[in-house]
Image (tube, helix red, strand yellow):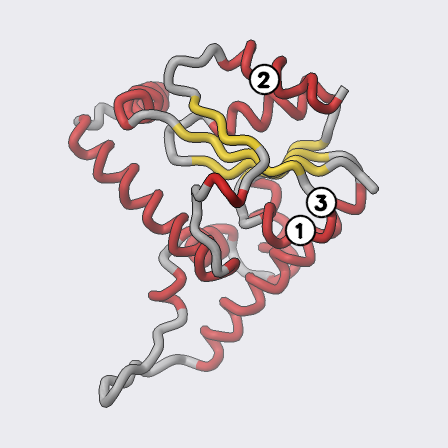
Amino acid sequence: MNKIITVGRELGSGGRELGRRLAETLGYEYYDKEIITEISKRTELSEKYVRQVVENNPHELFPITIGHSFTYIDAYALERKQSVFREQENVLKEMAEKSDCVIVGRCADYILKDYKPYRIFVCASMKSRVERCREHENAEGNDVPDKKLIKMIKSVDKNRASYYEFCTGRVWGDKLNYDLCVNTTDADMKATVEMIAKLFK
């Protein structure tokens, strides 16, 4: 069985960088945005649409009627969203069966539970996360106030938590759901990756 490492992360924690560097260090395949691209190809839906489905609050995508309050659900739209979730599972399993790999996000830790992945969750202080997000926005030529960055971080994390709970029935970020929790607040990313890589060499 191939060695599978999954990486869950808070926005701005550096989880994506950690996953990419870990894959490079170990010589593993690295999957992140490629998952969205592959789902888009298979469903013939735009990458933008697929990203909206897997990154937005799932309770908004699949509304539940309560009491006498009913929400109209377009059957075709619902089927498209369900097809995204189905293909996400198929894509992840095919990637896991192909070779040793590092997979970032997408509830891979749960979807691939039968493959016995090593599950990592990356977190950091809000101050550290704001700094990382600011660096990213500045690199893109954007000057975003810290207050707006904090709002964005909280919104993305809320959606990730809702999506994870919706797909897995588990609590996102709960230490009991992972094999290793990494706090990158004051960590040297290179040294951290090298330390984690030793577990697989």
Residue at the far front: name it: 176
Residue at the far right: name it: 1
Which element is circle 2 on?
Answer: helix
Residues under numbered marks 2 and 1 in contact, where contact means CB atoms less than 8 Å apart? no
Q: Residues within 10 Å of mark 1 (few under 14, many from 20)?
A: few
Location of the C terminus by quadrant is top right
Q: Which mark is residue 193?
A: 2
Picture layout, residue 66 above or below residue 52: below
- Determine which quarter of the picture holds residue 7: top right
- Side (left or right) of 114 relative to 192: right
- Determine which quarter of the picture holds residue 127: top left
**Residue visible at 19% across and 26% down in the picture:** 146
Residues under numbered marks 1 and 3 in contact, where contact means CB atoms less than 8 Å apart? yes
Q: Which mark is residue 72?
A: none
**Residue visible at 43% across and 42% down in the picture:** 173
Which element is circle 1 on?
Answer: helix
- Side (left or right) of 136 relative to 87: left
Which element is circle 3 on?
Answer: loop
- The residue indicated by pointer 3 is 116
| Nearer the camera: disc 2 or disc 3 | 3
Return the x and y of residue 70 as percentages of the image width and height: 28, 85
Residue 132 visible (yes or no): yes
CA separation, marks 1 and 3?
5 Å
Q: Of marks 2 and 1, which one's residue comes earlier in the chain?
A: 1
Return the x and y of residue 198 as percentages of the image width and height: 69, 17
Return the x and y of residue 5 as percentages of the image width and height: 65, 35
- The residue indicated by pointer 1 is 113
CA separation, marks 2 and 3?
21 Å
The type of residue carrying mark 2 is Val
- Side (left or right) of 3 relative to 24: right
